[in-house]
Amino acid sequence: MKILLFGGTAEGHTLARRLADAGHLVTCCVATDYGRDVLEPQPNLTVRMGRMSQDAMAAEMADGYDWVVDATHPYAAQVSVSIRTAAQRAGVPCERLVRPREEAEDVLWADSPVHAAELLADLPGNVLLTTGSKDLATFAQVPGFAERIWVRVLPSLDSLRAALDLGYPAAHIICMQGPFSQEMNAATLRVMDGKVLVTKDTGRPGGFGEKAAAAREAGAKLLVIRRPVQETGLELEELLKKFTGGTL
């Protein structure tokens, strides 16, 4: 079976590798150099790097693929819309890989990154921002951000450059690849005297539980940005069973 998979997430990488192990011919499309570099090559697995327009997606999907899998990040809502629409245009069935949510206590919810930045303006203390490089400009609008906010981003030159160009001090930029344990998150909060940890509702693959537990341990508030849409689809093991269990 020939499968086109979109996604640079941890579970997307796992799915691509396991489908290739099962004998399927998998092409995994990732948006960045970093997404390509962390997915090791193996038989039956091809990795393509670069963002694609909806037209380009549809053209690629029509090239003999049996299935399309959307394993993009749960906050990449517009990309998911483009993938579904392109699959419909190409006449190729599409499945969505979804992340289950994890519960946490004493959560302060925000409806968007902009809303989270507005809430931070009224919350005292230093902030550990773990929402990724795409939202750095939004949080640079928080009064006193250069003194208050520490950012944790992927170890890529693009992420580092984006943070520096926006005025985040070098001493407040943590470039590391996760996943991060509760102990590491808590230690980071203690070292920077963090009073607020900002994250997205990323589920287990995004280390949400470890962040929530670390915030409790360190006595910090947990500010969580809601997912942009309520998605339907299959979780990782369900999707693997579908593709390898003879249900197609």
Image (tube, rainbow, N blue to C red):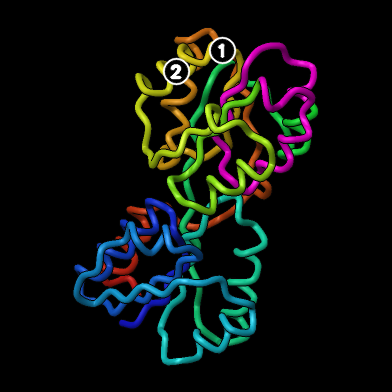
Which of the pair 62/139 is nearer the observer?
A: 139
Judge the density around disc 1: few (<14), some (14-19), many (≥20) Cα neighbours within 10 Å.
many
Around disc 2, counting alpha carbons within 10 Å, would you say few (fewer than 14), some (14 to 19), or many (20 or more)?
Answer: many
Image quarter of the N terminus: bottom left
Image-quadrant location for residue 111: top right
Boundaries of the magenta span = 119-147
Mark sitting earlier along the chain (2/1): 2
In the depicted structure, whether residue 192 falls above or below residue 34: above
Q: Residue at label 1?
A: 220
Instruction: Residue 219: give x, y in percent of width and height.
Output: 53, 7
**Amino acid type of the residue tagged 1 in the rendering:** Ala
Name the spot of residue 106 as percent of width and height, x first. 60, 15
Residue 43 place in picture, x, y as percent? 19, 75
Q: In which quarter of the image is the C terminus?
A: bottom left
Q: How many marks?
A: 2
Residue drawn 45% across the image and 92% down it: 63
SS state under label 2: helix
State if disc 1 and disc 2 touch (CB < 8 Å). yes
Q: Which mark is residue 214?
A: 2
